[in-house]
Image: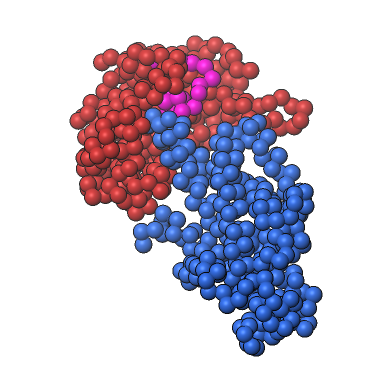
Chain colours: A blue, B red
Amino acid sequence: MSLVAVSFIFLVVLLCLLAPYISPHDPFEAVARRNTAPLTGNVFLGADVDGRDILTRLLWGGRISLITGVIPTVLATAVSLLIGMSAGYVGGWFDQLLMRSLDIFFAFPLVLVAIVVAGVLTPGLFTVMIAIFIALIPYIARLVRTTTLSVKTQPFIEAARASGARESVIIFRYLLPNTVAPVTVYATTLIGMMMVLGSALSFLGLGVQPPTADWGLMISEGRTVLRRAPHATIFPGIMIVLVALAFGFIGDGLRDAMDPRLRSR
Amino acid sequence: MSDLLTVQDLRKVYQIGRKGLLQARRAVTAVDGVSFVVRNGETFGLVGESGCGKTTTARLVLRLVEPTSGWIGFDGWDLLDCNKKEMRQRRREMQIVFQDPMTALNPRMSIGTSIADTLRFHGIGDSRSRVEEARTMLEVVGLSRSHYSGLPHEFSGGQCQRVGIARALILKPKLVLLDEPVSSLDVSIRAQVLNLLRTLQNEYGLTYIFISHDLTVVRKFCSTMAVLYLGKIVEEGLSDAVSREPLHPYTQALVNSVPQPDPRAPKARDLVGIEGELPSALAVPKGCRFEGRCPHRMKKCAEKEPALVDLGGNRKVACFLHSDAEAPTATIS
């Protein structure tokens, strides 16, 4: 299943990268009558409220959506590893200080934090990424910290210390690999969710601005004509769901692949 | 025989949380003034039930845990005076084998790398020679060279323990602490591992500290033994003498609780369990620590604590039945 998901994501990424070459129309130009239904005339998936080709816009919009899902999650994971591991490893008041500050974020729903951050900055792709990046850190850092705490007390860490390992060696050679694995799995499942969040921000007008193509934005624009032209909302919606789902499956697959107990079988 | 390790009045107090906001912080004394000497080439046994401070003592000796007070002398070094760098060098000469062989190995690292890493920590050789040496070590402990790249979960507990032994011995240490090395193994594997340890000891001239709760194993394996009860040594002596003629009521109880293998053997000793439970280390009895469970308790035992007295012939015991000496009043806050 995760193989299917990987191939699907690969296909979507490829198609989005090739958008300038394979898309049938210009993403910003009206090429058909407003709200043209799918499979009519020159528009395969129909046209949106401004008469723009939906298939073309899906291809172009995928670039933005994938970027908002992947990049902030990867960056947030890196920063969280630093925060969570130092908090968990050092412990004491340092741990308390870091984690209690992050706890403040848990008082608000993730979406709300992202909305606040995005609202403060000027709308745009960069803002969406910053917002998601900041909103994600507490969640991943908390997992990193708990994982660090449990790995740190494992006898093999003490065994390494007893053998004469330096602290730096213990951290990078023994602690890190055992922490990164579960965190990577978690982060992968988050990518799909963050695409949805990015789309939500664009939908609310806090993210990418029209006329840029973005799946969330397309849903937002389509909702005004939901009854007359449901296809304008349905297709980007399907894409978001499928890609988010695929990342979830990849996370599951990674979990199995990274478990040393299952690796050799 | 010269002394390799001298431990004097070793004490470890753990501060734990307060019970209520207004109460004072509580302290647990896990190891309470333990002193012993381990001579070159001998096997020193530390016996006691779980929670008596055996493992803590081992970790204190290796400074994996910092002692609250005391003195540790190892091979001419004052261990507690060593800085981080010096301590790392000392660790080339004192290694430990852990109780649970599975969790003592990094689950994501091949067993060979785990062994070779010990050399790497001390900057010995290059990566190729380290692999070679680790493979040789695998053979020494009775595994095969081709096991190098296997992951810990692919091996049995006994095999993992052999890996743990290989890791400890690759540096050719002087002292090896064996923290219940066979307790988590099947009985059928135990003898194999113990024989291996014995062979290696003769081959490399090792000194062992063998920690166990199993008196029969200690009796067979160790030359000297000390019995720990609630963080204190209550009896010490040559292991044969101690197990044949235990002096402290606690040791007697331990010896008597070992079942006799022959059902037709004359019931020289009835199986006598010890009544009661190990008291909480939070509320150590005022007098003798064993007083509450002791079949021979006297009036005095509840008030005064007996000192560990040398009876001659390497025999020491802390019990008023054998000596009237009192321990100096404890100075724990």
Say which quarter of the image contains residue B214. top left
Q: Is residue B63 located in the magenta-colored stretch of the structure? A: yes
Q: Position of residue B254 (x, y in %)?
A: 43, 33
Say which quarter of the image contains residue A219. bottom right
Taking depth in this image into account, of A84 and A155 the one nearest to the observer is A84
Q: Residue at x 69, y 85 (%)?
A: A37
- Check the image and report above or below for B198 versus B326: below
- Check the image and report above or below for A72 versus B178: below
Taking depth in this image into account, of B211 and B153 the one nearest to the observer is B153
Q: What quarter of the picture does the C terminus of chain A occupy? A: bottom left
- Check the image and report above or below for A72 versus B114: below
Taking depth in this image into account, of A76 and B57 the one nearest to the observer is A76
Q: Position of residue B129 (x, y in %)?
A: 23, 37
Taking depth in this image into account, of A171 and B279 the one nearest to the observer is A171
Residue span colored magenta:
B57-73
Residue B243 seen from this side: no
Q: Residue at x 19, y 30 (%)?
A: B203
Q: Is residue B325 located in the magenta-colored stretch of the structure? A: no
Q: Residue at x 46, y 28 (%)?
A: B64
Q: Number of callouts in the render?
A: 0
On screen, residue B5 versus residue A233, left or right, reads left
On screen, residue B329 versus residue B73, left or right, reads right
Q: Position of residue B278 (x, y in %)?
A: 54, 33
On screen, residue B137 versus residue B187, left or right, reads left
Q: Residue at x 31, y 51 (%)?
A: B150
